[in-house]
Image: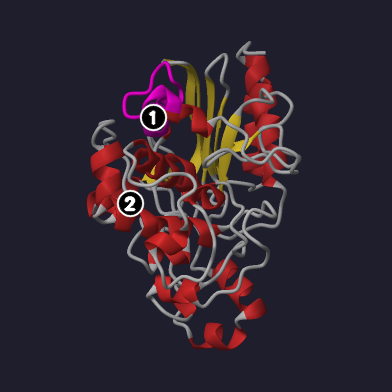
Amino acid sequence: MKFKNYIRTQIDKKVFPGISILVAQGEKICFKKHYGDKSIVPEKENLQEDTIYDIASLTKPLITSFLTVYLIERREINLNTGIKTIFPEIPFNIQIHQLLTHRSGLPAWFPFYLYNFDYRSVIKSMTLESSPGQKVKYSCPGYILLYFVIEKIGCGSFIELAKEIIIDKKKLKNTFFKLPEKQKPNTAPTEMGNRYEKKMAEAKHKTASEKFDWRTRLIRGDTHDANSYYLGGTAGNSGLFSTVSDIFNLSLEFFPQTATILRPESIQLFWKNFTPGKESHRTLGFKLNTSFFSSGGRAISPSAIGHNGFTGTSLWLEPDSRNQFILLSNRIHPVVQNLNFNRIRRRLHLLLKRDLNLI
């Protein structure tokens, strides 16, 4: 099969140490395979069945958006609820749907931990880059703000709410925000310290960055994203650890035919285009494959929804066929490389579809 040769080529080029792939149609798994190593530093370790990955920003749709829609379904909040009504001290006229669809006006990234571990106080003093609703700009701070919304409205910790409402209900045995020590050896490590994030911080936050005690050890079993790490495991933007099998089971919750937690009308919010006319077409939590920049590629249905994770992960769901494409890798191990990983994702989707006769 051509996709196997392509994967071997990428491993030989050291694009990623290894990769776990699962392709499904509805509730049927069509293909599940692991290639390469989970670790090359300090020594090589082969990928194992259901190696656990830091899935990074896949946390946004799979957990943060899902929990928000759960609260909306229960009429605790609605899409038009203003942040000021929840946190009067935050001086922004941002609505819930704008946070979920990356139209808040908040910046793409901000190193909260450099200034204060009380992230809400940092958000209060931030400056919007555009008026809420004006532009679609991917924003981690937007999802960090949703983290606090979920805790306030849900009357509990984000991690416990995720466990109670999603992880336990779905009986996900290898999905965690805080990994038990016994699970860490079966986890794919990420970067050697936060070198990449430190470099980003130095560009605009040089003085604060120089004073900060950055992680330098190999990151394994702790979330790679520093904003998530310094808030105790997640900040709503990242931090979830999981396997291809558990993500497959979780992805079934986004199809009305197999959803067990949310009602069908709530599920439709994950498929509705809230940003028509923009380059990036956004649903609640996901990107549509009709977007100008997409990792789905032409092989994936234009009406598909998907999301990437910085560590080298992605998920794409097709509505009619209910095809699911799950790619998990630790492409930032041991260092973050400057390459177009979306191009590799698109090529893999095409080859997988062809070789598995899914086109």
Q: Which residues are magenta?
A: 245-265
Asked if residue 252 is among those painted magenta in the image, a careful observer would answer: yes
Say what amino acid the circle numbered 1 marks: Ser
The secondary structure type at the circle numbered 2 is loop
Where residue 92 appears, as percent x and y from the top left, is 53, 66
Q: Nearer the viewer, residue 73 or 281?
A: 73
Please report the residue visible at 70 percent of the width from the left and 54 percent of the height from the top.
135
For disc 2, the marked residue is: 177
Where residue 213 appears, as percent x and y from the top left, is 44, 81
Q: Measured along the vertical axis of the image, is residue 3 above or below residue 335?
A: above
Q: Nearer the viewer, residue 243 or 60?
A: 60
Whether residue 342 sits left or right of residue 69 in the image: it is right
Q: Which mark is residue 245?
A: 1
Residue 10 shows in the view: yes
Q: Measured along the vertical axis of the image, is residue 262 above or below residue 359?
A: below
Please report the residue visible at 69 percent of the width from the left and 26 percent of the height from the top.
302
Q: Quadrant of residue 348?
A: top right
